Image (cartoon, helix red, strand yellow):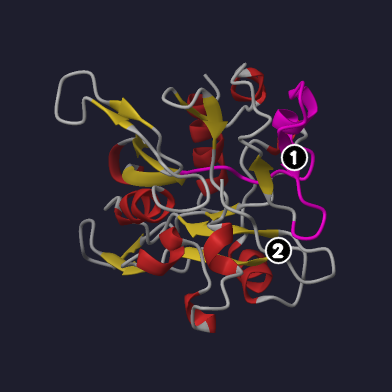
């Protein structure tokens, strides 16, 4: 395991904001995440039978695609999911060795592979399915927000973002300090009604989802969207996300 660079002083809530309105489900974020992290802090990330019938392996970012709604209100929603870096993470609470921990300085939840015993209690406790078991090494692994990128002073400052953010062709992924109300990501969440996944669980996830905007139909047209700025709450999009909550929590 490589050593981790220390964050700057001062508590932060680093996390992702994912725009469900612009995500096209291309999986570029998942692939670039795999590429970077298979040689990074949590390396390697194994694959088993990758071209066979029983493919499995470690992926920190996975994309779920849903057909939501009925009739003219139906749409396809691509739903990327990874660790949400909760403020009160259940995975940390249940870990018997302290291998799962949350950094006070930036809020990132990590796993110390040297003390992890692979008991999988954290994966059972996580309601978001964000933990990945490395069967080769017998330890749990997870999204680190590319900690070896975001603090890497050998990279240009604009490149110090998670691999998934850097590669998204639709600019659907955003990274920043959600604990700072003046940050770009916090302003984006406020403007678009950013949504916490399954907030009723009480783990206070840091990551936010921007709900898809409902299209209006131009007068005299059938199904042709005239604008995409209808308020998400009025369009019933938050109930759509609640529906996805239920699917993901099964």
Q: Which mark is residue 178?
A: 2
Q: Which residues are magenta?
A: 81-106
Residue 82 within the magenta-colored segment of the rendering: yes
Element type at marker 1?
Answer: strand
Element type at marker 2?
Answer: loop
Q: Nearer the viewer, residue 215 or 194?
A: 194
Q: Assess disc 1: are there few (<14), some (14-19) or many (≥20) residues with their C-alpha within 10 Å of its C-alpha.
A: some
Please report whichever mark, 2 or 1, sits nearer to the chain's N-terminal start: 1
Residue 102, percent across and down? 75, 45
Residue 68, percent across and down? 37, 37
- Is residue 129 visible to the viewer in this orientation of the structure? no
The residue depicted at 41 percent of the width and 58 percent of the height is 21
- Is residue 196 visible to the viewer in this orientation of the structure? yes
Q: Assess disc 2: are there few (<14), some (14-19) or many (≥20) residues with their C-alpha within 10 Å of its C-alpha.
A: many
- From the viewer's perspective, is residue 133 above or below residue 62? above
Residue 149 relative to residue 199: left or right: left
Residue 46, percent across and down? 35, 34
The residue depicted at 41 percent of the width and 25 percent of the height is 136
Asked where in the image residue 221 lies, by quadrant, the reply is bottom left
Q: Nearer the viewer, residue 156 or 175?
A: 156
Whole-angstrom CA distance, mark 2 to mark 1, is: 19 Å
Q: Which residue does the numbered mark 1 point to in the structure image?
A: 101
Residue 17 relative to residue 178: left or right: left
Residue 2, percent across and down? 57, 52
Magenta region's main secondary structure?
loop
- From the viewer's perspective, is residue 56 above or below residue 195? above
């Amino acid at each position: 395991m490589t050593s981790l660079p220390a964050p700057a002083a001062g508590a932060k809530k680093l996390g992702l904001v994912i725009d469900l309105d612009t995500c096209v489900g291309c999986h570029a974020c998942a692939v670039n995440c795999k590429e970077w992290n298979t040689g990074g802090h949590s390396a390697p990330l194994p694959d088993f039978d990758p071209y066979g019938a029983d493919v499995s392996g470690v992926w920190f970012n996975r994309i779920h695609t849903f057909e939501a709604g009925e009739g003219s209100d139906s749409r396809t929603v691509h739903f990327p999911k990874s660790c949400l870096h909760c403020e009160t993470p259940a995975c940390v609470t249940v870990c018997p060795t302290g291998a799962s921990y949350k950094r006070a300085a930036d809020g990132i939840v990590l796993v110390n592979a040297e003390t992890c015993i692979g008991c999988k209690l954290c994966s059972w406790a996580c309601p978001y399915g964000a933990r990945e078991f490395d069967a080769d090494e017998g330890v749990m692994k997870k999204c680190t927000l590319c900690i070896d990128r975001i603090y890497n002073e050998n990279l240009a400052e604009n490149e110090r973002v998670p691999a998934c953010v850097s590669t998204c062709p639709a600019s659907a992924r955003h990274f920043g300090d959600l604990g700072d109300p003046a940050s770009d990501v916090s302003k984006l969440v406020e403007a678009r009604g950013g949504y916490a996944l399954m907030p009723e669980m009480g783990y206070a996830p840091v990551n936010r989802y921007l709900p898809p905007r409902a299209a209006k139909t131009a007068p005299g047209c059938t199904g042709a969207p005239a604008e995409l700025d209808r308020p998400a709450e009025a369009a019933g999009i938050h109930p759509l996300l609640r529906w996805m909550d239920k699917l993901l929590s099964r």
